[in-house]
Amino acid sequence: MATEQSVTRITYPANADLSAKQYHFGIINASTKIAAVASQGADADGVISNAPSAADQECSLDIAGVVKVMAGATLTAGMLLTPGADGRAEEGASGDYIVAKAITGGADGELIEALLRSSYKIP
């Protein structure tokens, strides 16, 4: 079972219905709203921790600490993580932004624990 520890959480309005994006990577967009990451290897600001069902509802974004994140592939502890095209966690590769490190492993569709970190791009 995935847990959270020492989480820093911020709240802004959702840019859309994000009810299916809980525990996916998210960003704060140019309109100061939280949006789901929608491209493979993109930079992320954190993990969406609630499930707002409409635009402008309160949306929480975990930006630091050990958080729950949805696996988008089979992951093992220690892997460096990047957002997949659907915003779920995948193993980072060349050209991807690394935004977290897996603390626990899990299969595709399972919640794992990940340590959020300052993002950087793999050359």
Image (spheres, helix red, strand yellow):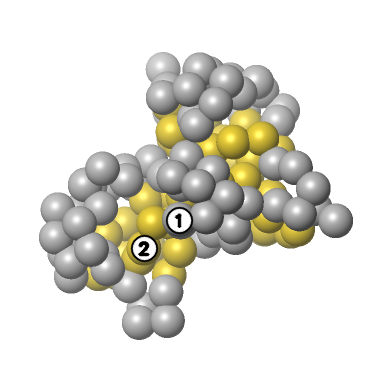
**Label ID, residue 35:** 2
Give the SS element for disc 2.
strand
Q: Residue at x 61, y 23 (%)?
A: 75
> Where does residue 82 sit, x and y in percent of width and height?
62, 45
* Above-or-below relation of 48 to 2: below
Can residue 64 be seen by looking at this rendering?
A: no
Q: Residue at x 54, y 38 (%)?
A: 89
Left/right placement of residue 53 relative to residue 6 reads: left
Can residue 97 be seen by looking at this rendering?
A: yes
Spatial CA distance of label 2 from label 1 is 9 Å
Q: Residue at x 66, y 35 (%)?
A: 91
* Above-or-below relation of 2 to 58: above
Front residue of this view, candidates 10 and 59: 59
Query: Quadrant of the image for the C terminus?
Result: bottom right
Instruction: Kindly indicate the quadrant of the structure image that contains residue 77.
Output: top right
Give the SS element for disc 1.
loop
Q: Residue at x 38, y 41 (%)?
A: 23
Instruction: Kindly indicate the quadrant of the structure image that contains residue 57.
Output: bottom left
At label 2, counting other C-alpha atoms closer than 10 Å, the crowd grade (few under 14, some 14-19, many 20 or more) is many
Which amino acid type is marked by label 2?
Answer: Ala
> Where does residue 83 sit, x and y in percent of width and height?
55, 47
Q: Are marks 2 and 1 in contact (CB under 8 Å)?
A: yes
Q: Report which residue position mark 1 lands on.
A: 38
At label 1, counting other C-alpha atoms closer than 10 Å, the crowd grade (few under 14, some 14-19, many 20 or more) is some
Please state which of the two labelled residues, at mark 2 or mark 1, is closer to the viewer: 1
Which amino acid type is marked by label 1?
Answer: Ala
> Where does residue 32 sit, x and y in percent of width and height?
36, 78
> Where does residue 52 sit, x and y in percent of width and height?
19, 54
